[in-house]
Image (spheres, helix red, strand yellow):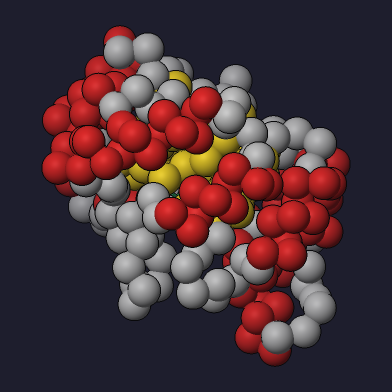
Amino acid sequence: MARLSVNVDHIATVRQARRVMEPDPVTGALLSEIAGADSITAHLREDRRHIQDRDLILLRKMVKTRLNLEMAATSEMQKIALEVKPDMITIVPEKRQELTTEGGLDVKTNKDYLKKYIETIKDSGIKVNLFVDGEPDQIKAAHMVNATGVEIHTGRYAELKNEKEIESELAKIHNAVMLAAKLKLNVHAGHGLDYRNIKRIAEIKEISEFAIGFSIIARSLFVGIEKAVREMKELIK
Ligand code: PXP
């Protein structure tokens, strides 16, 4: 069964609306683990719009499963990753004005930079995944820069309404997953996954982990975070 990494950024988004102490993403992470989350994801953004440095430090101390730090490939973030030592980092593109991550990383045109960047982080024992669109060229480039794995961007699949387009996007994701698995990359997937659209993606057995945030945190407002996590785990199963 694929693992579930719960992204706690959106708990921090609510907290930052008031810039107070609660709701605390660290508490949310620990309750998610109790409910069966296999890993916790947090994205420390350059503008610190949700997760704060303090959250990351506490998450590292408290998370008992695995901590995945999402970050841009900047020197500031590299320094933080080397200090905090999450179990894994996921490199994502980051533009200040976007509401969320809009698309995959362009690994192909940044191969030299990323190869060096990844090497430094892997040397300290941290796994490095790259968030990419389901494009064969980007998957091959991720392999060339020695990433541990890829997280395939499912945002477009999640947005589609037309059945034919959904099928075609699923086929594209499936092919990308198979290529990544053939290249011996760890294969994760995420972005925009919810309680409805997870089922078809979870049928792709080669995906070993799903990173899901918004839908779980949104649902937890009404049913509590433990139930929201358990329900998602059940759907993945
Ligand atoms: N994976 C990556 C790389 C992301 O940037 C995000 C959003 O922070 C997610 C997964 C989770 O997406 P969502 O919050 O839509 O579930």
Give coordinates of residue 214: x percent, y percent.
Answer: 55, 60
- Pick the quarter of the image with the N terminus: top right
Residue that extends furthest to the bottom in the rendered view of this protein: 18
Residue 107, above or below 181? below
For the point 40% across and 34% down, the residue is 118
Q: Nearer the viewer, residue 42 or 210?
A: 42
Residue 147 % position (x, y): 38, 27
The percent position of residue 175, horizontal first and vertical second, equals 23, 23
Is residue 121 visible in the rendered image? The answer is yes
Q: How many labels sit on residues?
A: 0
Above or below 19: residue 84: above
Q: Residue at x 49, y 74 (%)?
A: 47
Q: Is residue 29 above or below residue 17?
A: above
Q: Residue at x 30, y 13 (%)?
A: 183
Q: Quadrant of residue 150?
A: top left
Q: Can residue 170 be seen from the camera position used here?
A: no
Q: Residue at x 78, y 68 (%)?
A: 24
**Left or right for 71, reference 161:** right
On the image, which quarter does residue 113 sit in? Answer: top left
Q: Is residue 138 left or right of residue 14?
A: left
Quadrant including the C terminus:
top right
Q: In the image shown, does 85 or 201 lie closer to the viewer?
A: 85
Apparent side of residue 6 relative to residue 175 in the rendered image (left or right): right
* Residue 203 on image: x %, y %: 43, 25
